[in-house]
Amino acid sequence: MLLMLNKEMNGGKQILACDFLKQIDPLSDFMRQYENQRHMRRAFEAEYRISSFNYVLLLFESVNRILTVVNARYE
């Protein structure tokens, strides 16, 4: 169900929470409240951690693929 809604609303591309948060006017009263700024910082930090972890996983996957290809050639 969620995948179907994402295809209809976003054309199927992945939308990050930070993309939605960037659309809020930073000078509005809503964003000037301390609690909301704190949540915004946490959201950006969480997105950064997730992206960093994905890069590390891609690195390990690439190493596994290279080792598999090298091992297959020399057997």
Image (cartoon, rainbow, N blue to C red):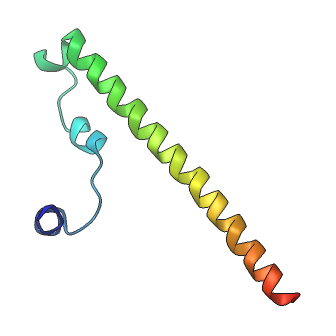
Residue at 77% in and 73% down: 67
Residue 61 picture quarter: bottom right
Q: Is residue 75 visible?
A: yes
State the image coordinates of residue 26 (x, y, percent, origin top left).
22, 24
Q: Is residue 28 visible?
A: no
- Give the residue at the far right of this rendering: 74
State the image coordinates of residue 19 (x, y, percent, origin top left).
27, 44
- Quadrant into which the N terminus falls: bottom left
- Number of labels in the image equals 0
- Quadrant into which the C terminus falls: bottom right
State the image coordinates of residue 34 (x, y, percent, origin top left).
24, 10
Residue at 29% in and 26% down: 40
Residue 12 picture quarter: bottom left
Task: Give left or right: position of 43 versus 2.
Answer: right
Residue at 11% in and 64% down: 5
Residue at 45% in and 43% down: 50
Residue 23 picture quarter: top left
Q: Is residue 75 above or below residue 16?
A: below
Q: Is residue 22 above or below residue 41?
A: below
Task: Give left or right: position of 58 versus 32.
Answer: right
- Give the residue at the far top of this rendering: 34
Give whichever of 31, 58 is nearer the camera: 58
Give whichever of 23, 16 is nearer the camera: 16
- Give the residue at the far front of this rendering: 75
Task: Give left or right: position of 69 versus 13.
Answer: right
